[in-house]
Amino acid sequence: MRKIIITLLSLLLIISLVSADELNDCPGLTRTIEGSLFLTKDDTGSIVKPLSGVKLEIQSSCGNTYNNMITNSEGKFSAQVQGPVSVCISNGSAYFGVCHYLHNKNNLAGQMRVKEGKEITINVLNSQFNRYPKTINILQCSDGKTYTFTGLKIYLTKEMGVCSLVAHDNKKAYMGQIDIETVGNQIDIELNQKVNTIDLPSLQAPSGESSITMHKGWNLMPNSAFGGKLSTCLYNSERDNLFSYDFLTKEYIPSNLESYYEHYCDTNAVQCNNNKNQLVTELQFGSSWFYTPVSCQMISDSTHNDEADSSLLTTGWNFRYITKNMVGNSLEQISENCNIISAYYFDSVSQSWQNIDLNQPLGSFGKGFIVKVSNSCSLSSSSGGPPSFPS
């Protein structure tokens, strides 16, 4: 499955390269572009109302200069352009949102959805990192919610109110307060506290997702939780923070497993194709070592993996995590055809291994474990599910 996705992406890339000149040629024919601007709220993107009298900038890829557009009473706008352009909210606007890129054959910017508030650049004066993200930026706001941002930008809306800002780079941290009414478009911060002396704000998992706590030190985390949209953990330097187990070579790799296999399969296509089912299993049900110098949280949507096929195991050690439907079942119950030699949790609080009794119910969702088997076999992640429909 994974290999098929990569192959399709490669074909799409080739097609895009062939047609690139036709779509992005300068200066191109004069054409009229149009679209509309709407105010949205929350993370749902639901439309509140059209925005009138808002200034939009046209940014040309060919070096052309255009006047700013102003939306009409219905939030609509139009302009004559040549070549590929981007339509963006003007700097200093009371709104923020992504730019819409239009190539030579695209005249419709569509519905541009923005939020009321500010896009703010976080300028870290003394981070240990020279590349981005330099810090993980966490906002705990008076609306009762916690927000996290990586990279250069954070985004404030009026509904968020006054927020406390915590930023850290795994060594040092900054703590302060920001108010949308008084903050500018850039904040200079200096990391002046040791990160292991502070408590990071707590995250509340959205409906259908789960919060996984990473304790100070080493943790076994679900592979599918890595890079999630909400996290107070920073993994800017994978070589220091993340180690995955490659079942093909039986060795540790200092990398996120997904990006490792994408690179590995470029030069080992036959081996990856022969093991594609196992590759997908490792990405969906596998776990990796993650090190953090401060206790933090990740929000995982790994619960959707319970709808997938059973977790395949290969001879030797296998790194896994407890899925939603494994909770309450023992390894003996969910092992379909496995000869299990041994299994262990890694207790991240005490930083020690704990033996798993094969007949005792497994623990909480997201908890990582390792299991050693003498034969290739599978664990059924959905053993507790309802019967299937009759044929």
Image (cartoon, rainbow, N blue to C red):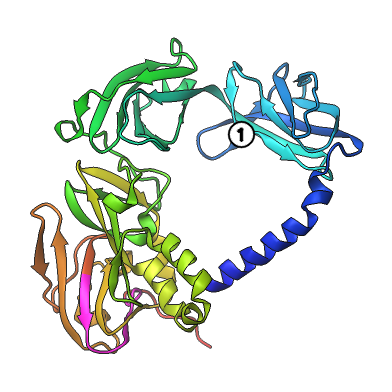
For the record, the magenta segment spans: 370-383
Up the image or down, 206 lies above or below 95; here it is below
Give percent across and percent down for residue 205: 35, 45
Up the image or down, 164 lies above or below 15; here it is above
Nearest to the observer: residue 232 or residue 39: 232
Asked if residue 162 shows in the view, the reply is no
Up the image or down, 60 lies above or below 102; here it is above
Residue 301 falls in which quadrant of the image? Answer: bottom left
Classify residue 304 as left or right of residue 193: right
Query: Looking at the picture, which amino acid does disc 1 mark?
Result: Val
Asked if residue 43 shows in the view, the reply is yes
Residue 381: say if magenta: yes
Give percent across and percent down for residue 53: 73, 16
Element on which disc 1 rests: loop
Give percent across and percent down for residue 146: 35, 33
Neighbor class of circle 1 (other Cα within 10 Å; few <14, some 14-19, many 20+) is few
Per the image, the residue denoted by label 1 is 98
Residue 95 falls in which quadrant of the image? Answer: top right
Total residue callouts: 1
Give percent across and percent down for residue 328: 22, 69
Classify residue 73 as left or right of residue 10: right
Residue 9 falls in which quadrant of the image? Answer: bottom right
Nearest to the observer: residue 150 or residue 345: 150
Q: Residue at x 54, y 40 (%)?
A: 44
Residue 167: say if magenta: no
